[in-house]
Image: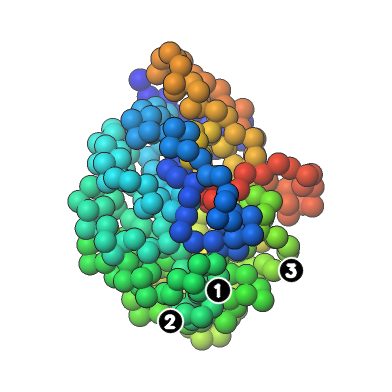
Amino acid sequence: MNHHIKDSLDRPLRDLRISVIDRCNFRCQYCMPAEIFHDNFQFLPKSELLSYKEIVRLSKLFASLGVKKLRLTGGEPLLRKDLTTLISELIKIEGIEDIGLTTNGVFLKKQAGNLKSAGLKRVNISLDSLDDKLFKQMNGRGVGIKPVIEGLTAAKEAGIGVKVNMVVKKESNESQILPMARFCKEEGIQLRYIEFMDVGHTNGWQMKNVLTKKELLEILQAKFDLEPVEEDYFGEVAKRFRYKGTTTEVGFITSVSESFCSSCTRARLSANGSLYTCLFNGKGHDLKSLLRSDMSDEELTGFIISLWNQRDDRYSDARSAGTVKNQEKVEMSFIGG
């Protein structure tokens, strides 16, 4: 039986983001700073991660409640063994129209063909710089851009849709705004500029480090002729523009300067099976224990419905209004952004 549910602010549930692992091969400062996520950091043991069977079971329940899109995240999701096995099961779920993956791209060269065969439709590749020296510095592991570009190329050649995500931080990678735009325009790939966000407590976020969509757009419009694009669906996150005379777009994720709380349709499942109703909300709801109890699908569905019906998260609105209290937050690396 299908229920299409809404929260207390009349927002439907359409998207589920699933973190499959909390580990990553990078240590980007805005996500997993190396001084905190050091070599002795205790990541989750395998037994604490949701199994693929558990992820599939939950995804079926969420699909029955109106979820149409799934996105696999991490950490770095391609570090999870046999991810294609999971994707090939998720793609069979009735009601699921789209499966995406957010990755740093390093392992795509090797895995792109198999991911496509398993049913993966799209990847979002995180790439914050085309300058090799700066990129090595930003990822905290001294990895150059070559494997990422090779991964991007492999995904395109395999027939997977590709978007590139660039987190822009003042006094860090501003110099890369135009080079990234030119590169993605030439490749015919949508580049999405992401405002530096105050996710978690470890990334040292300050408003002075945020380059807003307005500022970014001014930089681009000085060099390119851009026209706005209408949103495709309710709850679309990116504010999109098109390079005139082309079909190539550029998007902006504006959770700091232009909140999109009012149309947020996303739930997030952490690597250890907690459900979060907002990227900025540190209060997770433990679904793993319920999955591993004798709770029936019907009872579990009822629990999820009650959580969503009560949902009233509007963190970015509160930040804009200056009314944010000292809210507990979950780390980006644990919930996949």
> The disc labelled 1 sits on which kind of residue?
Gln
**Residue at point 22%, 58% (across, down):** 113
Q: Which residue is mark 2?
A: 182
Mark 2 neighbour density, 10 Å: few (under 14) some (14–19) many (20 or more):
some
> The disc labelled 2 sits on which kind of residue?
Arg
On the question of residue 307 being in view, the answer is: yes
Image quadrant of residue 110? bottom left
Provide residue 183's location: percent of width, then percent of height: 40, 79
Left/right of residue 285 with respect to residue 256 in the rendered view? left
What secondary structure is marked by label 2? helix
Mark before the other along the chain sequence, 1 or 3: 1
Which residue of the protein is positioned furthest toward the front in this rendering? 40
Task: State the CA–CA distance, disc 1 to disc 2.
Answer: 22 Å
**Residue at point 46%, 64% (across, down):** 126
**Residue at point 50%, 36% (across, down):** 272
Q: Which residue is mark 3?
A: 208
What secondary structure is marked by label 3? helix
Task: State the CA–CA distance, disc 3 to disc 2.
Answer: 26 Å
The circle drawn on residue 217 is none
Provide residue 127's location: percent of width, then percent of height: 46, 68
Residue 9 in the image: above or below residue 223: above
Camera-side mark, 1 or 3:
1
**Residue at point 44%, 32% (across, down):** 47
Left/right of residue 200 with respect to residue 45 in the rendered view? right
* Front-most of residues 68 and 157: 157
Provide residue 301's location: percent of width, then percent of height: 45, 22
Provide residue 227's location: percent of width, then percent of height: 47, 73
User: How many numbered marks appear?
Assistant: 3
Camera-side mark, 1 or 2:
1
The circle drawn on residue 137 is 1
